[in-house]
Image (cartoon, rainbow, N blue to C red):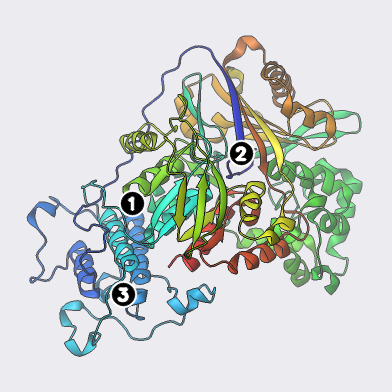
């Protein structure tokens, strides 16, 4: 399995391709937007009446006095899809937020539209946002159709709309038009609000820039490398366009799915093929593979006596694990700090920890469970153990409460399409994107509020073009981004700064603002080498080892920590590669010293190791003659450790940042590993502070 990582590390690659392979055209991503509403300080005022009339027109309940222009009427209106409904609801929420500076009551859709547009979620009032809360008091009063609204129901007077509010409202209207299927793709004028600088162009940086643009800020984003997306990248091997980093996201929350829906990719969300993951274990002196128990969380079994658990840990290990069901739970379990490894060992024993939990945790987080904070890696687990009286019952309860379906999902065509869509969306919103733009220093502005951002001089390189998916919208984004690869200004006076880098670079820059940040420097994450093999091996058509394997730390004859059988996992990729051809991705960065050294091996050595390891893990001989294509992608310090006490450290760092108005910190080193954690944390932070 491939860990979900976002932050931008140092990255290198070597590529070797064999036979050329035809690649089916990617799904063309349309971006229907109207140019009627422009994001500028002179944008027309957006009122509850204009919004409701627009939505009524979409629902087919158009009042006679507000006719829709003839050229905007489609020949026939199809029933609104769930994606369109969600997008419209999101646009309404943005309008509520934009109007927060002039009216406390949210804009609500007329009652006649409730079947078409879900009710907007409760919004953040300005005073609640400034206090760091996530929601304000719910406003009373039901909305009535705008055509029946009297003057007495309207606000007596309106204050002059600020540039930020005007731009936010205009952008919200643009999203509303996108949900309604407008065809215009003309970009809006650049916002004229306060200048925000985002440092770091990984997923957290791109999402932060989007939130700032929505709130009406002028936004610059500076990325030190040649590509945006951090550890969500694209590469081509044997003619196949593949993910070079994170290839899926956790579905424990809707954070990623919500963002994909807003970007027009909601209908492309897919789940893995059935088959599940397997384990590769050492039993005595023998090595073998078996399916991973399906009832667990992070490898912790919900049924300690299940057949797969007994096979993995032995009868004695299963009996020890089952003792969890009858052993009392002390209230001290939820007090103080505790590692995931300590919790599992105390409740279920070492066999479960070594053979079930460690392979999963090391495969996803590249870390030892004994070093990881249980509250950061599995929020709510300790409290659930106390509530249910056992670790197994707590896990079973949490699994039962989780959304139905797979624990992970992806995007048809690869997660790299998320980066393409974000970049295109930012460019259309007027965000300035600078690649190869290293921020050398950050300090408070001496003569004004805000910050002085110092940029290191840099020359554009021949390899600077960002990689994006093959569709018109992405090609437009790539072309526009390429034009901004030249170094920007050497100094920028920013009203707001968002640091979206890794922990080490962030502390380096924060030290220029306040020396008190230095003691909070995190330890560096583990290095990872991802080896991709495209092979011609019809024997793998039946996916004999499911969608991939996780390797237990006791295994000595395999250097990889995980193998993903990508063509068995994702149907779109199996269709693209064709019968007999398979994509295997092996991840290197094991916990023991001997295997971990492979991360720094040269590409030829990694190729040889990958062929040997794939043969052992899959149970058939794979030789160099089977290889159609090969690539190595390296991530240095990609995965930050959520070590014991992580939540407390994050709270302290952010409390210190809050003493410097206009400063925000986001990224995996604070939010935790995985797209779901990073996207949810970034949007939460920026929605609270950016308005």
Name the quadrant of the N terminus.
top right
The structure residue drawn at horizontal position 75% and vertical position 26%, both measured from the top left corner, is 598
**Sequence order check: which comes first, mark 3 or mark 1?**
3
Labels 3 & 1 near each other (Cβ < 8 A): no
- Marks 3, 1: nearer the viewer: 1
Left or right: 463, with 82 as reference point: right
Q: Is residue 487 visible?
A: yes
Q: Quadrant of residue 540?
A: top right
Q: Which residue is mark 2?
A: 9
Q: Which residue is mark 3?
A: 107
- Marks 2, 3: nearer the viewer: 2
Count of numbered circles in the view: 3
Q: Nearer the viewer, residue 425 or 343?
A: 425
Name the quadrant of the C terminus.
bottom left
At mark 2, the secondary structure is: loop
Q: Quadrant of residue 196?
A: bottom left
Q: Which residue is mark 1?
A: 429
**Sequence order check: which comes first, mark 2 or mark 3?**
2
**Sequence order check: which comes first, mark 1 or mark 2?**
2
């Amino acid at each position: 399995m491939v860990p979900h990582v976002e932050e931008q590390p140092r990255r290198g690659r070597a590529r070797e391709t064999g036979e050329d392979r035809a690649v089916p055209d990617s799904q063309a991503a349309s971006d229907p937007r109207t140019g009627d509403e422009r994001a500028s300080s002179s944008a027309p005022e957006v009122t509850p009446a204009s919004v409701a009339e627009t939505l009524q027109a979409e629902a087919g309940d158009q009042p006679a006095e507000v006719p829709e222009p003839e050229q905007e009427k489609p020949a026939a209106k199809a029933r609104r899809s769930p994606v369109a409904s969600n997008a419209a609801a999101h646009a309404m929420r943005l309008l509520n937020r934009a109007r927060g500076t002039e009216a406390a009551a949210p804009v609500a859709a007329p009652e006649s539209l409730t079947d078409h547009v879900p009710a907007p979620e409760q919004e953040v009032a300005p005073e609640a946002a400034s206090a760091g809360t996530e929601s304000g008091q719910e406003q009373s009063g039901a909305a009535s159709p705008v055509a029946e609204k009297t003057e007495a129901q309207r606000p007596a007077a309106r204050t002059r709309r600020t540039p930020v509010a005007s731009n936010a409202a205009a952008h919200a209207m643009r999203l509303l038009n996108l949900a309604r299927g407008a065809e215009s793709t003309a970009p809006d004028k650049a916002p004229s609000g306060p200048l925000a600088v985002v440092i770091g162009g990984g997923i957290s940086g791109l999402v932060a820039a989007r939130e700032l643009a929505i709130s009406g800020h002028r936004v610059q984003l500076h990325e030190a490398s040649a590509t945006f997306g951090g550890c969500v990248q694209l590469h081509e091997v044997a003619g196949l366009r593949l993910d070079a980093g994170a290839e899926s996201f956790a579905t424990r929350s809707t954070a990623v799915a919500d963002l994909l829906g807003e970007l027009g990719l909601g209908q492309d969300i897919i789940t893995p093929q059935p088959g599940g993951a397997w384990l590769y274990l050492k039993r005595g002196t023998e090595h073998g593979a078996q399916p991973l128990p399906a009832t667990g969380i992070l490898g912790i079994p919900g049924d300690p006596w299940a057949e797969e658990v007994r096979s993995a840990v032995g009868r004695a290990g299963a009996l020890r694990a089952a003792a969890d069901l009858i052993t009392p739970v002390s209230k001290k379990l939820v007090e103080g700090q505790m590692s995931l490894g300590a919790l599992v060992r105390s409740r279920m024993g070492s066999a479960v920890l070594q053979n079930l939990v460690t392979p999963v945790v090391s495969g996803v987080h590249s870390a030892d469970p004994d070093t990881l904070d249980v509250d950061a890696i599995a929020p709510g687990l300790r409290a659930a153990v106390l509530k249910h009286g056992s670790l197994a019952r707590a896990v079973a309860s949490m699994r039962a409460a989780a959304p139905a379906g797979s624990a992970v999902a992806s995007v048809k065509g690869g997660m790299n399409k998320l980066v393409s869509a974000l970049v295109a969306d930012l460019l259309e919103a007027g965000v300035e994107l600078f690649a190869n733009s290293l921020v050398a220093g950050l300090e408070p502005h001496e003569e004004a509020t805000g910050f002085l951002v110092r940029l290191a001089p840099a020359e554009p390189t021949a390899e600077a073009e960002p990689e994006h998916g093959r569709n018109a919208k992405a090609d437009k984004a790539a072309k526009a981004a390429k034009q901004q690869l030249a170094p920007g200004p050497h100094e920028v006076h920013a009203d707001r700064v968002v640091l979206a880098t890794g922990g080490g670079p962030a502390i380096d820059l924060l030290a220029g603002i306040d020396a008190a940040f230095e003691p909070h420097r995190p330890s560096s994450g583990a290095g990872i080498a991802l080896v991709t093999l495209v092979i011609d091996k019809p024997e793998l058509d039946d996916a004999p080892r499911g969608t991939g394997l996780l390797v237990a730390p006791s295994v000595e004859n395999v250097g990889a920590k995980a193998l993903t059988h990508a063509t068995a996992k994702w149907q779109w990729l199996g269709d693209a590669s064709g019968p007999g051809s398979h994509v295997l991705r092996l991840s290197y960065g094991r916990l023991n010293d001997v295997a971990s050294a492979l991360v720094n091996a040269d590409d030829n050595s990694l190729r040889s190791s990958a062929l040997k390891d794939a043969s052992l893990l899959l149970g058939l001989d794979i030789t160099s003659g089977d290889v159609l294509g090969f690539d190595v992608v390296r991530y240095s310090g990609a995965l930050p450790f959520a070590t014991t006490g992580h939540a407390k450290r994050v709270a302290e760092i952010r409390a210190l940042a809050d003493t410097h108005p206009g400063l925000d910190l986001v990224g995996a080193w604070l939010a935790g590993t995985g797209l779901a954690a990073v996207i949810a944390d970034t949007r939460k932070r920026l929605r609270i502070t950016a308005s």
